[in-house]
Image (cartoon, rainbow, N blue to C red):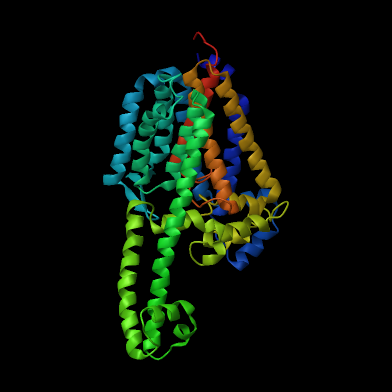
Amino acid sequence: MIKRIIKNIDYTLAITTLLIIIFSLIVIGSATLEFTDASFTKLKDLNFFVKLLKLDYEYVIRQFVWVLIGIVAMVAVLYIDYEDLGKYTRSLYILNLVMLLAVRFMGETALGAQRWIPIGPFQFQPSEFAKIIIIITFADFLVKREGRLNRFRDLIPCFIFVGIPMLLILAQPDLGTSLVFIAITFGMLFAAGARPALLVGIIGIGLLAGVTLYNVHAYYHSADMVLEERLVEVKKAIGGNSLYVDSDQGVQNDLKKNHLTGSKKDLQTYYDILVKEHEKAHQRHEKFHKYTLKEYQMTRLTIFMDPESDLLGAGYHVWQSRIALGSGGLSGKGLLGGTQSHYTFLPIRHTDFIYSVVGEEFGFIGAVTLLALYFVLLYRGVQIAMMARDTYGSLLAVGVVSKFAFHIMVNIGMTAGVMPVTGIPLPLFSYGGSNMLANLISIGILMNIYVRRQKLIF
């Protein structure tokens, strides 16, 4: 049985995965090092192989341990016929909800989010495995509805099925993973036979709702901030510094509207009016965030469009990432040669912004090489979906490919400053145990489908 599995493995997918992981271990070992001017100068002229000995092997070893655990899990998944997974979808779905609910009560908070459950010296992130479980369970859900996905009302049960765990993840809050669920859902619905026009229409409505939400927020936020600034300046004018009040046309129009002059008494009256207006505007602003996204989430989603508006705040990550990618040039600054990385200008460089390190140290050539490896991985995933012996296997493969494709697109777009900063890691590359384990299990699912693309007798 084992010999037959080994004989039928997709070696292109296996080798591609291995190359991505090896590349990632090198970059992680480099990204986690911090240098002074003196230590950076000493390492700059060493050859590549000597530099390999200077990597931060504490992080490399930790990640390598997770790679080994992931390979064991991948082999275990490969050994089980993927069709058997469909028999346990109800139990898996319930397990998924229990894990996500456990985060609410047992989760550890870090970086403003409650996503991790501590287990001894390790941290377990249920949302990473929730993606795999939703692929397995949603594939079975769609198989049972094959041929009945042509109308919007046919899709409502699908959205509810995926929406329940997605809302639990959004509450952590983890907007990035919630968006991955949406990508998986639409990818699998398309593969299951839902009308493309219907899916495009829903996506269009969603985008329109997003734009509307952004504009409403911009209005409430601007009204709140303008009144807050005006209060400060009017207070200064009451104290004798009336330069802003005298020159601001909006203030002058407001004073005329309320039949007030620039006298100290009238300015105090105007100040009292502004206080009440600001309270109302602030309440509307706060109410908006109570029922939608938080202020920092809205900022993270939109700051990529104008990072220069807040270079020392929300725009810092995107701006430093752009500098790192752009400074790499054609061939890069060389391993351990990235100034943005090793002088710690680039934040969270071993996880979310690891692609920026690739661009800085390995240049355009290194960045494109990694993209080429991901292209091969996704291409093989699509081929496996087409070769699957049944609809269930095909949908499983499409779910995994959708997950990987969305992660790659958003993470690289994020580091290049053309997509929102959502905290989505680069699959098989970013540092993180749960992420690596979940991704290798996903590769195991693809391998499983490929090995059993024809009915094998073991």
Question: Could you say where residue 46 lies in the image, as x and y percent from the top left?
Answer: 69, 56
Question: What residue is rendered at 41% in x and 29% in y?
Answer: 155
Is residue 106 rendered to the left or right of residue 194?
left
Is residue 66 rendered to the left or right of residue 342?
left
Question: What residue is rendered at 58% in x and 60% in y?
Answer: 320
Report the front residue among 302 and 246: 246
Report whether residue 141 is seen.
Answer: yes
Report the front residue among 170 and 212: 212
Question: Could you say where residue 390 lies in the image, as x and y percent from the top left?
Answer: 50, 16
Would you identify the image quadrant in which residue 93 lies? top left
The residue at the far right in this view is 330
The image shows a total of numbered marks equal to 0
Question: Could you say where residue 151 lies in the image, as x and y percent from the top left?
Answer: 44, 26
Report whether residue 133 is seen.
Answer: no
Report the front residue among 319 and 294: 294
Q: Is residue 167 placed above or below 421 in the rendered structure?
A: above
Question: Could you say where residue 408 lies in the image, as x and y percent from the top left?
Answer: 56, 41
